[in-house]
Image (cartoon, rainbow, N blue to C red):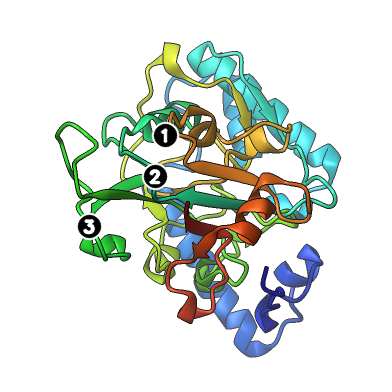
Amino acid sequence: MREKKIDQDQKSENPTEALEEKSSRRSFLKGLSIGAAAVSASLVTGCVPDVGAATSEELKLRWQEFFKKNYRLMTQDEKDQTVARLERLASLRDGMELQIGTEPPVEQVLYGYAFNITRCEGFMECVSACINENNLDRKTNTQYIRIFEMEPGKLDPSEGNGNFYHEVPVENKFYMGTQCFHCENAPCIKACPTKATWREPDGIVVVDYDWCIGCRYCQAACPYYGRRFNWGESEVPKDEITQKQHYLGNRKRPMGKMEKCTFCIQRTRKGKLPACVEACPTGSRVFGNLLDPDSEIRYVLKHKKVFRMKEELGTEPKFWYFID
């Protein structure tokens, strides 16, 4: 594996330092403009509690949610209080009994992913599994994973067909999957004006949906088509909702926010495989701990012919393609 590159803008591991920089007149004015944008976006997307037909308990909980801290600045007690509110709100509004976790990164774990382009046959089970596991909007058919049907000799998905509707596999074609690549030097993190997205110690790039203002700068910065913007309230049939969730993962996202693949953080931090890996019928998806020399992902990187998309950009994605 390549040695890690540490970006100058991301070298501080202290979230308080990252979020509470020493103020100057310039940074103060910048903060005012960002704050105004956040309030404006909140009003547009309906984040400010609306009395409507809400009960007094629900209204109180919604106000508390509106004024909570960025996830990285919360103590564990504050995180526990936050998920308790969200679980109670789900019960009051939707009659849902959710289990929202805040599992932290596991020590000595750095997640990596590899995709075998010689095995994938374009069946799309991975896409369906991702949609179901991550409570993606059914109305707009939101997908974190895209599968491209490729011509021989082509390795750029933008040159492939991502909207094929026919029987697969097709002779003399191959298939490539894309999603968030969880870059070590992620452009989306630098682009976010509210620090709503960051990279966790286990390598997962996450989003605090309640601090995202929906500006879509991260989407423009991502060279891998990894970000999704939700234009409306997420619609998932009640009997299809995955109730075991993570605060930074598959919980319900407010309207007007950015979202993306999180390597199924609600599963992987409990020792399980991402839903797409588990669902793949051809074994073309490999996931594991890059710091474990005996892991399958390390075996692939050592013994297979591997490459990463757009390596010349220096983003250091933790997503490799390989061939048998």
Q: What residue type is labelled 3?
A: Gly
Q: Residue at x 50, y 46 (%)?
A: 261
The percent position of residue 318, horizontal first and vertical second, equals 58, 60
Is mark 2 in CB contact (under 8 Å) with mark 1?
yes
Foreground mark, 2 or 3?
3
Residue at mark 2: 145
Residue at mark 1: 126
Q: Which of marks 2 and 1 is nearer the N terminus?
A: 1
- The local secondary structure at tag 3 comes to loop
Most foreground residue, 319 or 283: 283
Is mark 3 in CB contact (under 8 Å) with mark 1?
no
User: For the residues marked 2 and 3, what is the alpha-carbon distance in whole angstroms?
Assistant: 15 Å
Most foreground residue, 321 or 68: 321
Q: Earlier in the sequence, mark 2 or mark 3?
A: 2
Q: Which residue is drawn at 56% across and 47% down?
A: 210
Is mark 2 in CB contact (under 8 Å) with mark 3?
no
Most foreground residue, 301 or 233: 301
Residue at mark 3: 160
The percent position of residue 214, horizontal first and vertical second, equals 42, 57
Q: What residue type is labelled 1?
A: Cys
Q: Residue at x 42, y 42 (%)?
A: 46
